[in-house]
Image (spheres, grey):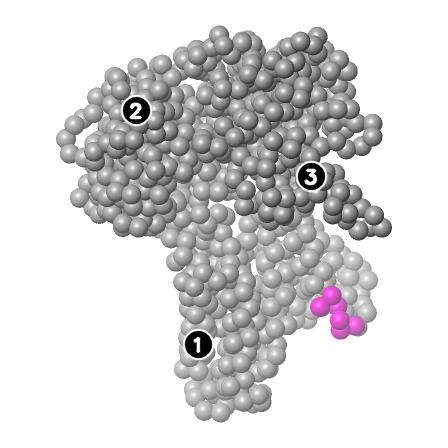
Amino acid sequence: MTGEEHSGEAPRCALSVQGLSKTFAGSLALDRVDLEIAAGEVHALLGENGSGKSTLIKILSGYHVPDPGGRVLIDSHPLEFGSPETSYHLGCRFVHQDLALIPTSSVLDNLSLNGGFPTRWGTIRSRSAKQLASSDLARVGLDVDLAMPVGMLSPAQRTGVAVARALRQFGRDTREVRLLVLDEPTATLPENEVDHLLDIVGRVAARGVGILYVTHRLDEVFGLADNATVLRDGRKVGTFPVSSLDRRKLVSLLIGTELDEVRAASQALHSEGGDAVLRVHNLEAGPLRNVSFEVRPGDIVGVAGITGSGREVILGAIFGATERRGGTVRVGDVQVRSYRPREAMDAGVGYLPPERKTQGGLMEFSARENLTVTDLAPFWQRGLLRRRGETAETKSWFGRLAVRPAEGIEAPLMTFSGGNQQKILFGKWLRRSPKVFLLDEPTQGVDIGAKAALHRQLLDAAANGAAVIISSSDVDELVALSHRVLVIRGGRIVARLQGDEINVAAISHHALGADEEVAGV
Amino acid sequence: MSERRRSLNLGLERFSGVYLWALFILIFGVWKPHLFLTKATLHSVASSQAIAAMLAIAVLVPLATGAFDLSIGATINLSTIVVTWLQTTHHWNMWPAMIIAVLVTFGVGVVNGFIVVKLRISSFIATLGMATVIAAIQSIVSGQSQPLPPTASAWNSLTQRTVGGFQIVVLYLIILAVFFWWLLDHTPAGRYLHATGGNLEAARLAGVRVDMWTWLSLIISATVSGVAGVLYGSLSGPSLTFGSTLLLPAFAAAFLGSTQIRPGRFNVWGTMLAVYVLATGVKGLQLVTGVQWLNDMFNGVALIAAVGFAVWRQRTSAARRSLAPPTDHGDSHSDDEAVEVAGVPSSG
């Protein structure tokens, strides 16, 4: 959609990667990867966590030095490895998910900070600083007030400011920008703002800049990219013209058949029927209004919805992580009050929060302490907390969840990889055998292997009679796991899908509000 | 190779204070053997630091839960004044006077906890403000004049009786230290207190009653300060101003202690070690030079050095880890590099 303007010229290569490998401690993170991006091309780089895409980007930015043998050309100039300066001078720019903007400073100041303000006698020449900033913004087609604090902009606008800043030219001998790497720029954007950002990207590409667009949102790929390269386990699965792909094919390229297997396993489970173990009635919290539903033992219920719809607060509100304005939550016969996590736990609820680092784990504490903190009673005997029992239980969970390194039970949680951290946090709830297991983004930021293991644990928990409720922005995951899917839009449940109704298209359709009718409660 | 390096590091990292202590003793022992290497020095260092050490334990508990108690200096002072004022001005018996003094400080802890937990005011501000309020209350009670020291011999022998050459206050300190070591390291309560300080939100979502533990920790710090204040009154007699001079050393010891024995955690034995290493250094230098400003200089430098060291340690281990930053939502940067670290056994 964007490369056309330049199709008349001889195609220049903005980026050419040839036979790039990188070994970390004996394991290959990147295995002879080739990649070419033409000037003005938007090239999507796709891969799950651990696929090697961030390793590749960090080689381009000069952070990692690859194994000998590989080559990277930026506009046919060879990139000297391990030198961020060279990468910059050759015209590579990077915008990471953490935009590195100062929210309390104005747009103008943020644009000027790392390049310096134009000054005379040590005083900022505000008019020329403004002119410069305006032209930066014009370059990406962004129309915002320069005096506005960045924190007050919408997320898409903020990303736009970061892109504008990246494209600014500093230093005489710096070459023109050839390659812009956008590293998951939309990971935290509400879906309705993604279009705006895609506009910006298109505009930059139209200037003849090659764009490497890293994302895990598959839908964007179709609207934006000319080509897509898929990495898995450090190897390149292939580069495909986007027009030759559909979502299903892309998913199988990315993760193989794991989700198909999960879906089959999930469908093989049948609910034990009987009375609902969780009854949520007229729940009000955040944007949520009048949300009611029931879940029976053995059920796996998915909750879908765009960020901001209320999907992201529903499980926390049920558990008591956040306050409810109204409504009741009953677990079995017990009514659980608002904002009382302990009470919910005592009633048999477990809750895996979406943010591992800030809510899920005690990152500086050992894996053992993280695992056992949910219930210390078994180890408290005759006036002492018995270390031996704790160690034994932790070991058994490490075995059951295949946590690596297996002997790391005393290592701080933060030293584990994302997937293994998540396994440990799963263990901390599974050891309580919850009757109701609430999971917010259960497999975000984990590699494929860990994802499969976590899915298996979920299915096991359901098979053992737990009511499992998953809120996830990964729609493919919800489709694979769920017996039922509740779609939330604007704070209300707008659809309750089950059986064959559960598919990505239907969920997106309801989540984005293509129809206005509200499903009955 | 890495295995050996790790165990070597561990020893140096965890017990650097012990080495420093040995070094002090060696240096001053050689320098002033007749003054320094005496039982009298041992006994005097042990008992002169006992109250400071108790205050360090007091401050340790809220620090473990992530709260500051800056009012302990004022609290210990209030306790001393109350316990002596009741005895000399109101002619109370020492035991009820002691009980009232400790109850008053318990009340201070309850108020501190209320302000921090219920009013959601940061503990730093809340206890800083309370410190001044307590000082005002002390002035009201004492009428700005130092009460006379009680004369009962039972009162003096409460702390000054000697056991094996040491004043008995040293024994009280050991009992207190053992109790808090047990509480913090060997009970579920201790685990919850530490978890609250480790990550308040994560602890809360794991079912830890973080508000209760924060409140309780502030009650503990105030009450322990109160007990220490009573003992100070018996040991040294009443003073209107000694409390504030003990505040900084207590924090210095607790922070320095968090780099020892169990690095990265506030712990009792590390704190005790820190108190006595500093005291030994100060004592030795005083014997050598005879100057009085050493104590302040030492404690100030030690506090900054301890926190600096902790920050540095965190940064280096973070740098080691930034090879593998823990993955966050949708952040794919880490798993790749976790591989990098997986090969190197990461020393915590």
Q: Residue at x 20, y 25 (%)?
A: A271
Mark number, residue A133: 3
Question: How far, Cα to Cα, is label 3 from label 2?
Answer: 49 Å
Q: Residue at x 46, y 50 (%)?
A: B200
Which chain does the residue under circle 2 lie in?
A
Q: Residue at x 62, y 39 (%)?
A: A100
Q: Which residue is mark 1?
A: B104
Q: Is residue A114 visible?
A: no
User: Which circle, 2 or 1, is nearer the viewer?
Assistant: 2
Q: Quick check: A375 left or right of A484?
A: right
Q: Nearer the viewer, residue A364 or A299?
A: A299
Look at the picture and state if B86 lies above or below A340: below
Q: Quadrant of the N terminus of chain A?
A: top right
User: Which circle, 3 or 2, is nearer the viewer?
Assistant: 3
Q: Is residue A177 visible?
A: yes
Which chain does the residue under circle 1 lie in?
B
